[in-house]
Amino acid sequence: MVDDNELERLRDLAVPAPGGEAKTRALAAAMQAFDLDEKFSTATQGSPAGLRLTERARMLWRDVMQRKLIATPAITTLVALPIAGYATFEMLKDHPPVVGGNGTVTESLADKPAAQTPAPEQPAINEARAAARAKEKKTDADAETRANSQMAPAVPKPATEVDGLLKQEAAPQAKRALQPAARADQAPASSAAAIPASPPAMADSKLMVQPAPMPSDQMQPQEENRDRIETFKTNPVHETAQDPVSTFSIDVDTASYSFVRRSLKEGSLPDPDTVRVEEMINYFPYDWKGPDSAATPFNSTVTVMPTPWNEHTKLMHVAIKGFDVKPAEQPKANLVFLIDVSGSMDEPDKLPLLKSAFRLLVSKLKPDDTVSIVTYAGNAGTALMPTKAAEKQKILAAIDNLAPGGSTAGEEGIREAYKLAQQSFVKDGVNRVMLATDGDFNVGQTDDDDLKRLIEKERKTGVFLSVFGFGRGNLNDQMMQTIAQNGNGTAAYIDTLAEAQKVLVEDASSTLFPIAKDVKIQVEFNPAKVSEYRLVGYETRALKREDFNNDRVDAGDIGSGHSVTAVYEITPKGSGGEQVDPLRYGQAKVDNGGVANADEYAFVKIRYKLPDENVSKLITTPVTAANEVKSFDAAGTDQRFSIAVAAFGQKLRDEDQTANFSYDRIAEIANAARGADPFGYRAEFLSLVRLASSLDGNK
């Protein structure tokens, strides 16, 4: 604090009269100092036209704030640092700071035109005035130190960095500045006093850089999951005496397995409704025995074995293998890529992955095959007119040029795709629309039933439709299943480029070239041998008993070399594993005194149509003791692996039958039945079982 008595004493001191010799020496020293200083401002005397440093910073920050460039704390941090740097550069460019001998930054001549640096040779300074000036400087320095110490906590780190830049820029000037002679009564100031207090405007600007604190417990908003999944109930146990017949359509789709895999790899158990056990089983290639010639499009193999999760029941394993058409015998293909380029596809695992996937498919086509590309967003458009696969680069260029944007006019795109398919229709060939989408249809016919009728109508012209789903959060799985089933096509979910390689390259023959359509399976169980049964999976493919012989009822297709598996869990008569209580008043008896073919477990019937025919054919297979193996381990490698997959699917759906069947036991069965695994699919399955075990608490 300043001593008032000291100030009064200094005020009363007599001002010494100037001497002529002193004036001469002072003028000479001043002229010498002026000649030596090469960096003095060339501005004329008086107030400069430019703004003061404080006003320049104030206006700069005011403009930034008024334009509301800093909308969030994150943007504040990103914007503030470049602006502060730019402001520093502009201020130093026009008015470089003058650095004193003690390293402190002082105001420039523009801000303090009256200040003068004393010449080193100045001897004619009155000792009293010098002492007073020194004490005043010390007092001011103390006040500034206290002001800085009070403001220091409010100054954020970015402002400190800007001050550092100011000092670095001023360093070259310090070397060239005139240094006053050190006097015994002018001791160096403390380090705290060496830093001058910031002007009020600059202090305000620095405070604006400070981002608003984020509450530590604030949760980041999560993206809404708008996946549309069809809900269904697990197949119940049927009492053979009351309901001996089971009828369903085959399902060769694999979308469910890919969806389950993605969920597990992202660290969460899948939604039970996304787990369709039959699609998980049929995801894997199996070496079932196929037909000897194309005259019979597929062959069936039935095996009865003990159930690994229930000692009182058995499994009836039905395997179907389609005829594998050799590449040289494959018919010409007329393919229309119907690609969703709506705004919802603008994610890395959607349109970019889609483009890479279809590039793989193009490389698989023969030169005489035809490719067209239709896109749809706000409206549908033709990206590529029918083009022979021989013009590969033209097709790939059209794929590469696809870009997302707009809403989803799916219905209009489907109509345009069918129109192009008809223009390039190949008689006795493959005519197929390949729809690639995340399933978001929000313009046109958005109702699944309307889409179903549209697809059914076009199917009768000989143009089939397959669906390939991409991405998550907006996936319309329910729609994909509906139009694929009614378009005589398949539904696959592509979550990685490796999956695209599997579906569109390795399985291209079964995906593109059908050998049978409307394939239905009906099993009649013998009540004398089987008291109860249940079908594992195929809940969404159930048919009425009378639908089996009705050729007007649509069903699934089988492609070249395709394998299809169905598993029944049956309860043998008298095994003690029945879940349904017997009738109190007994069962109805037949008049002939017994049951025909009493030694059979069941009778399997398969009905199908050839791709270009509308009348179905029938294949039958009785299931007897000859189809039975004594132990589970005696079953074939592929049979045992498929049962492990079936158990895993039921476990993920939290079904009662596998509630006490551990993941470790599933992995044990799968590992023992791993067999030949050239593409690593079965090894990947084992890793998924381990992941699910960890996520589900090692149950």
Image: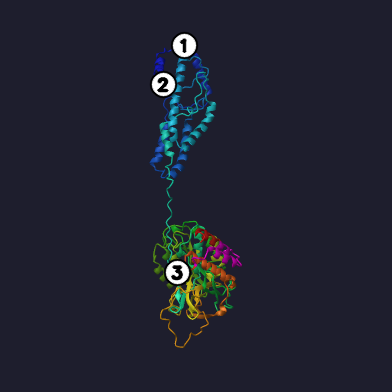
> Magenta residues, as a range?
658-686
- The amino acid pointed to by label 1 is Gly
Q: Earlier in the sequence, mark 3 or mark 1?
A: 1
Disc number placed over residue 2 in the picture, else none = 2
Q: Which quarter of the picture shows residue 394? A: bottom right
Q: Nearer the viewer, mark 3 or mark 1?
A: 3
Vertical arrangement, residue 303 with respect to residue 73, above or below: below
Q: Are marks 2 and 1 in contact (CB under 8 Å)?
A: no
Residue 379 percent across, percent down from the top left = 42, 62
Based on the picture, tell me whether residue 464 belongs to the magenta stretch: no
Q: Can residue 395 be seen here?
A: no
Badge 3 is on which residue? 234
Q: CA distance from mark 3 to mark 2?
A: 91 Å
**Which residue, as the protein is rendered here, is positioned at the far left?**
66
- The amino acid pointed to by label 3 is Thr
Vertical arrangement, residue 52 with respect to residue 560, above or below: above
Vertical arrangement, residue 634 with respect to residue 268, above or below: below
- The amino acid pointed to by label 2 is Val
How many marks the image carries: the answer is 3
Residue 192 percent across, percent down from the top left = 48, 28
Q: Nearer the viewer, mark 3 or mark 2?
A: 3
Give neighbour class at mark 2: few <14, some 14-19, many 20+ (Cα, 10 Å).
few
